Every structure is written in structure tokens, then in C-alpha cells.
Image (cartoon, grey):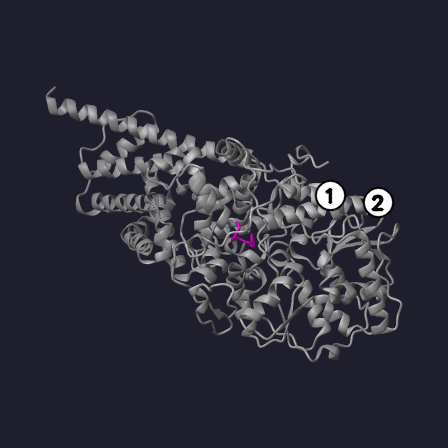
């Protein structure tokens, strides 16, 4: 075996190790965070008015929050539009990527194939808008920190490298699928020898690593926001705070 | 404009009515412009009775971090809200204190970030490592907290515009609870809570004076109506215990007399209590323990007086605390109904049942508009009842622009323990959105079911030169009721 091949084997092993590490941190971190939220009590029932009066109403409210961002719509129409397109593109791109991890590929994913590719092309536009907005509005500039920019840059870099390997510097699809299926079946094989693909893959792993520790947790946390996920019936029946008795007042 | 305090440049912006709404001008940022507006610090004599340290505790930094950890373990909301904010800025121009001052720390997200950066420093090192703003809890941060968490009225307007419903009030409450536990609180809030424990009410009215005032109001009512309308105090076995803001007994006497006429017309026996003659709960602005303790007095009085139900009067934070009574001090199953009732719910229901003879033309000299107090409306879900009352008692009712009412209402500018004179510029700046919304209607009567608003809004209207009288919702019923 020559030196180049040895180095390549080593890199491939590192890449695979990194992939498993980031997947582990992502899933473990996400579950831990959610377990923490579930474990933490909600002492007082504080619901956003006017709130849903029934459990189906709560489901509808959360579904609305996840799908159409009604509060944001009331707050800022342009931001709403940018954020909605941004998230819709992300969703379509994610759906399309399940084809690399599932065999056989579900009908739905095949049907959505084209529209998902358009979403990949469209994605940089709302991403750039959100980035530009952070710089252009003095108020948003004031509250923006390094992690806010890093997150946007990371997502845009992932989308761009993705479009490159799909269109302009095509990677051999059979290799990709062998590699990704190998990872999910715990029988890893070598990744395709394609630098942009490897860059794309590394960036995604970094995003996964970053996810549970950052504001990206809004994707999981939105389901646990007490103002949004409770029935608005604070008066009756009696709502019990499990640590209320510990607070002595006599 | 009064000379005694400087105005914020933001308050010179012009407000315009647009198609159904109000165009809200957003000021340019002016960093630190409100930094000098701080509440007077608490006094040892008030801290002692409310179980708080009389001076800054030793190792206060470590104690504060420990308290933050405790609160994170006790409040899911706090934990989630500190984690998931995407820093999108949708809330940035929604707070009346930002709109009034232009100080960036009055943007709800920036205000919350004052706590978030401490949280990140001690509990989220990964984000700190990647350049997230993080700072240890030190003297500088404590000063920022003390300034800006007492420039928040906990009105929750920002949460209505947050895609995740992040409730800045809960973050403000956590920060205030942390400060309280190391011995840092404001004079106004602690003084009021201490007065409740000493005298039973926020204003410190002694029992004999309360009884005296009630007798005086009975005489007033006799002169006005010729009827023997009673203002009962400490009457065992009455049907209803009414807990109103103590200001109704002293300043907003029209509202208090309206309660008297109301129960007289209905033939229901009622009473006030000199042990708990206060609905308002300033413990809400300080910590859980004091909130629970202040509220407990009401149910204790209800048991002593053997009443059948407790009704809360026209008060905002009284109602916000009242809706937690069942959780804090319950179960309330010795009462019927076994949950708190607000006087507006009660009266609106009675009006709907046709219990009163009403002559609406008695209010024809007034063009009425209605201010939703943040605690009654946004925190307490009473959006329809006060409106139903006004419609039933007045011919001329006009709503303020829709982006300033109901769940999107602006705070009067003095809720959350800010009704104190040393921060008058903050109060007037924060009250401007409400003043402008009121001006746009041309109304000459601003109906408000909240004692804090009733104390703050007349000053706001005077300051911004809006020609509207401020009064209660029951005052209108009182004028229109035919006895």
C-alpha cells in the first residue's frame, strides 16, 4: 500500500469516527435536553391569551407554531416571509436527503425530488436575507452574537456544497449511497473520494455537534414552551405545583 | 413638559393613526440612555419582615448562581426560554419601554440576554466557547440587572410576538428573585409587601381608617341616592368577600361606591376584611414565597368570615396573582365556585341576566374608550367581560387601534412594581404608546379596571396632553344604574 492510500484510509477512518461522534452527540444531547425539560416542573399555569380551551386546541396551536409561525407573522411580515421560506427549504432538503439513508426510497421522497432541488437553489436567498438583516438593522445587530452568524454561515455553506456536488462537481451517487447506508447499518465503507462531498459531510457533522448546545434547540424546544403548549383553564380545575408545599409561609 | 425630568428623544416621535391601526414609530437606539433611571434600593426595616436579607449577603455571587440553578430546576419555562431564543428580534420594537426610551436594553430580547449571558457563563459552556456572549455574575452585571429588570413591567406584550411564546416576564421574575435572595430589591416593592404584613394592605391604611372611610362613603351614597347603601367591613357570614385594591377605599372611591351600589341592587350581602383589604399582590414582583404569603391572607380571611365566595375587585396584578390562588393556597373547594372570580366577570354575568335597570343615557356626556390592563387582559384572559359591561352601560364606546388593545395591549407604563416616582421619566416614556392610542380615539373617558393603571394613567395623560379622564369600569355602571 502506498503512502497516499494509507493517508486516505486514515482520513476515511477519522471521517467515519467523526460522523458517529457527531450523530451520538446530536441524538444524546437532544434527548438529554428534552429529558431535562420534561423533568422540570411547570409551577404556575401561564398561558398566552387567548389560549386554547381543549387538548386538540393545544395540538392545533403547536402545529401552527411549527408550520406557519403565526406570532412572527403578527410581529414582522418581511421577517416572517424570510424565516418561513428558509425553514420550508430546510424541510424539503431534509426530506430529500432521507433517500440516502433509506432503502428502498419511499414514493413520497421520489415525488418531491424536483421541488426539493429547487429548494436547494432557493435556500441561499432567505439565508442571505437573514444574514443581511442582522447587519442592516441596528436593533438586530445589537442582539446578534457570533453564534448567530456562525449558524447562518454553516447552513449556507452546507447548502452550497450540497448544490455543488449535485450539479457542478457531481459526486458518484452510488458511492454516496453505499457510504451513507453503510453508516446507518453500522457497516461503514469508505466515503467517495470527492473533496467537496467530504467538505459537505464534515459541515453537516459540525452542525449536528453544535445543535444541542445552541439556539438551534428552538427546533426541539418549541414543543415545550409553557405559554404555548398548555390548555387555557387556569381557574378551574385546580392546577397543582408539586413544590408549592415546600415554600413555607407561616 | 414638566421641567423636573429630562425627556427621552424617543418620546418626541409622532404617532399616526392608519387604516384600523396605529403606526408605531420605532426610535433609533441610544445605548445607555435609560441607565441612570434606577429605583431606590430597599431598606433593612422592610426586608426583615418579608424574609429577605437586610444587606448584601456574603459570597453573593456564588449565592446568586446557586439560586439560578435552583430556579432552572424549578421552572421549565425559564429553562426553555433561556435555551431556545433564536435572537430573531421580532420582539425588539414591541416593548413600550423600548418605544419610549430607545435604550437597547429595553428590547425584550436584550433584556433577557442580560440573564442569558450569565446562564451561558455558568451553565452553557459550549456556546460560550463558540463566541456566545457570556459574563460572570459581577457588580457590573448586577447593576445592569437592577436597572433593566426594574424597567420591565412584566406585562408580557413581547411574548405575543415571539414565535415560541418566550415570556420575558418569567425571565424578569427569575432575575428579581435571584437579586432578592442576595439582598437586592427596590424600596417601593419591598415597602409595599411589608405594609401588607403589617396593616393588611398596600397603602398601609390602618383598620380604623378603613372603617372610617367606608362610613364616609356610605354617607356619600346616602346623599347621592337617598338610599341606605352599606359598605360592610369584617361581617361574618356575608355571602361575598370582596378584595379590591386598597386604593379603591382611598383614591378611586367612585369605583368603591359602585361596588356598594352593585351589591345593594342585587340584594347580596358582602363584606371587606381589615385583615386582607388588598387584592394587589406585590409579592408577584419579588419572589414566589411572598406572592404565596400575600395571597394566603385572602383565603384566611374568607375562612374567618365564613363567606361563600371571594370576588376580586378592579385590580390588575391582584387578578394575575388571584388566578394562581388555587395553586398557591388552594384547594378553594370550601368556596362556591371553587375558584377566583373577578368583579367584571361577576357584573357582566349579572348584566347579561338582566339584574339591573340601566339608563345608558346617563353616560352620554362621555365618549368612552377602554384600556386593557396587561394583567387583566393578557395575563388574566378577561377580554370580553369589561367590554360587555361598557356596551351595556354606555351609548358611546370607541375602541383604540387594534394593535394596541386586547392581547396586544400596551402596559400603562407602571406595572410590575414601577409605580414609583424616582423613575418618573421611565413611567412617562412607557406610558406614551397608551397615551397616543387614547388620543387617536378622541375619547374623553378612559375606562380601566386596574388600580395601578388608575394611578399611572392620569399622570400619563397630563404629561402627554391627552384630554381624557381616567376611571373605573364599574364607575360607568354606577352612573347608569337606576336604583
Q: Secondary structure at mark 2?
A: helix
Residue A174: horizontal and vertical position, in percent? 23, 36
Q: Main secondary structure of the magenta part?
A: loop
Q: Quadrant of residue B246?
A: bottom right
As drawn, the label of residue A108 is: none
Extreme top residue here? A1
Residue B248: horizontal and vertical position, in percent? 73, 61
Dot 1, how many residues are within 10 Å of its Cα: few (below 14), some (14-19), or many (20+)?
some
Lateral position of residue A136 relative to residue B464, left or right: left
Q: Quadrant of residue B122?
A: top left
Residue B402: horizontal and vertical position, in percent? 54, 68
* B339 in magenta: no
Dot 2, how many residues are within 10 Å of its Cα: few (below 14), some (14-19), or many (20+)?
some
Segment tinted magenta in the rendering: B150-155
Q: Looking at this view, is B352 or B412 the one in front? A: B412
Chain ID, mark 1 = B
Chain ID, mark 2 = B
Please say whether residue A30 is visible from this viewpoint: yes
* B154 in magenta: yes
* Residue at image point 31% right, 36% down: A206
Q: Looking at this view, is A56 or A208 the one in front? A: A208
Q: Are marks 2 and 1 in contact (CB under 8 Å)?
A: no
Q: Quadrant of the C terminus of chain A?
A: top right
Q: Secondary structure at mark 1?
A: helix
Lateral position of residue A186 relative to residue B193, left or right: left
Which residue lies under the disc numbered 2?
Answer: B304
Which residue lies under the disc numbered 1?
Answer: B296
Q: Looking at this view, is A188 or B286 the one in front? A: B286
* Residue at image point 20% right, 47% down: A167
Indicate whether A11 appears above or below B157: above
Amino acid at each position: 500500500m502506498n503512502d497516499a492510500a494509507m493517508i486516505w484510509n486514515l482520513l476515511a477512518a477519522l471521517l467515519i469516527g467523526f460522523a458517529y461522534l457527531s450523530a451520538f452527540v446530536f441524538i444524546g444531547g437532544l434527548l438529554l435536553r428534552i429529558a431535562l425539560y420534561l423533568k422540570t416542573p411547570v409551577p404556575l399555569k401561564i398561558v398566552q391569551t387567548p389560549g386554547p380551551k381543549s387538548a386538540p386546541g393545544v395540538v392545533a396551536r403547536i402545529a401552527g407554531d411549527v408550520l406557519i409561525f403565526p406570532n412572527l407573522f403578527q410581529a414582522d411580515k418581511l421577517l416572517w416571509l424570510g424565516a418561513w421560506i428558509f425553514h420550508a427549504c430546510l424541510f424539503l432538503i431534509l426530506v430529500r436527503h432521507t433517500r440516502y439513508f433509506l432503502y428502498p426510497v419511499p414514493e413520497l421522497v421520489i415525488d418531491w425530488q424536483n421541488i426539493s432541488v429547487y429548494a436547494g437553489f432557493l435556500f441561499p436567498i432567505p439565508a442571505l436575507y437573514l444574514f443581511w438583516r442582522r447587519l442592516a438593522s441596528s436593533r438586530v445587530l445589537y442582539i446578534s452574537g457570533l453564534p448567530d452568524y456562525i449558524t447562518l454561515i454553516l447552513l449556507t455553506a452546507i447548502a452550497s456544497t450540497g448544490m455543488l456536488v449535485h450539479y457542478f462537481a457531481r459526486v458518484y451517487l452510488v458511492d454516496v449511497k453505499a457510504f451513507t447506508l453503510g453508516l446507518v447499518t453500522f457497516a461503514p465503507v469508505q466515503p467517495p473520494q470527492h473533496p467537496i462531498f467530504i467538505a459537505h459531510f464534515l459541515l453537516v457533522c459540525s452542525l449536528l455537534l453544535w445543535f444541542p448546545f445552541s439556539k438551534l434547540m428552538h427546533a426541539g424546544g418549541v414543543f415545550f414552551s409553557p405559554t404555548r403548549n398548555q390548555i387555557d383553564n387556569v381557574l378551574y380545575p385546580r392546577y397543582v405545583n408539586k413544590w408549592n408545599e415546600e415554600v413555607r409561609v407561616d | 413638559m414638566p421641567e423636573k425630568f429630562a425627556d427621552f428623544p424617543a418620546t418626541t416621535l409622532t404617532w399616526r393613526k392608519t387604516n384600523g391601526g396605529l403606526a408605531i414609530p420605532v426610535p433609533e437606539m441610544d445605548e445607555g440612555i435609560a441607565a441612570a433611571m434606577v429605583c431606590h434600593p430597599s431598606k433593612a426595616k422592610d426586608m426583615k419582615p418579608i424574609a429577605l436579607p437586610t444587606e448584601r449577603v456574603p459570597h453573593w455571587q456564588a449565592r446568586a448562581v446557586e439560586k439560578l440553578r435552583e430556579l432552572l430546576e424549578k421552572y421549565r419555562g425559564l429553562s426553555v426560554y433561556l435555551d431556545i431564543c433564536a435572537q430573531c428580534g421580532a420582539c425588539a420594537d414591541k416593548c413600550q419601554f423600548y418605544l419610549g426610551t430607545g435604550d437597547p436594553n429595553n428590547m425584550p430580547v436584550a433584556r433577557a440576554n442580560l440573564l442569558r449571558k450569565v446562564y451561558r457563563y455558568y451553565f452553557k459552556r459550549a456556546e460560550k466557547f463558540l463566541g456566545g456572549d457570556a459574563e460572570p455574575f459581577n457588580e457590573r452585571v448586577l447593576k445592569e440587572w437592577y436597572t433593566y429588570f426594574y424597567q420591565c413591567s412584566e406585562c408580557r406584550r413581547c411574548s405575543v410576538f415571539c414565535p415560541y411564546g418566550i415570556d420575558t416576564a418569567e425571565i424578569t421574575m427569575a432575575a428579581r428573585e435571584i437579586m432578592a435572595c442576595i439582598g437586592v430589591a427596590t424600596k417601593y416593592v419591598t415597602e409595599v409587601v411589608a405594609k401588607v404584613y403589617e396593616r393588611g394592605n398596600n397603602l398601609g391604611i390602618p383598620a380604623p381608617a378603613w372603617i372610617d372611610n367606608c362610613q364616609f362613603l356610605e354617607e356619600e351614597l346616602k346623599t347621592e341616592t337617598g338610599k341606605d347603601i352599606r359598605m360592610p367591613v369584617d361581617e361574618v357570614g356575608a355571602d361575598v368577600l370582596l378584595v379590591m385594591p386598597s386604593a379603591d377605599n382611598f383614591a378611586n372611591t367612585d369605583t368603591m361606591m359602585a361596588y356598594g351600589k352593585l351589591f345593594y341592587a342585587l340584594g347580596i350581602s358582602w363584606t371587606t376584611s381589615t385583615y386582607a383589604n388588598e387584592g394587589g399582590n406585590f409579592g408577584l414582583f419579588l419572589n414566589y414565597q411572598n406572592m404565596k404569603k400575600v395571597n394566603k391572607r385572602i383565603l384566611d380571611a374568607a375562612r374567618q368570615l365564613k363567606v361563600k365566595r371571594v370576588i376580586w375587585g378592579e385590580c390588575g396584578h391582584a387578578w394575575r396573582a388571584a388566578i394562581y390562588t388555587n395553586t398557591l393556597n388552594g384547594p378553594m373547594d370550601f368556596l362556591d365556585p371553587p375558584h377566583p372570580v373577578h368583579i367584571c366577570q361577576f357584573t357582566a354575568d349579572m348584566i347579561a341576566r338582566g339584574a339591573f335597570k340601566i339608563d345608558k343615557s346617563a353616560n352620554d356626556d362621555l365618549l368612552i374608550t377602554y384600556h386593557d390592563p396587561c394583567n387583566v387582559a393578557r395575563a388574566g384572559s378577561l377580554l370580553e367581560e369589561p367590554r360587555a359591561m361598557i356596551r351595556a352601560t354606555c351609548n358611546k364606546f370607541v375602541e383604540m387601534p387594534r394593535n394596541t388593545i386586547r392581547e396586544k395591549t400596551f402596559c400603562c407604563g407602571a406595572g410590575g412594581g414601577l409605580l414609583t416616582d424616582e423613575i418618573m421619566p421611565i413611567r412617562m416614556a412607557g406610558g406614551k404608546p397608551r397615551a397616543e392610542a387614547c388620543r387617536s380615539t378622541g375619547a374623553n373617558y378612559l375606562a380601566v379596571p386596574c388600580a395601578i393603571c388608575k394611578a399611572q394613567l392620569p399622570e400619563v395623560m397630563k404629561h402627554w396632553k391627552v384630554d381624557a379622564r381616567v376611571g373605573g369600569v364599574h364607575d360607568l355602571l354606577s352612573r347608569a344604574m337606576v336604583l
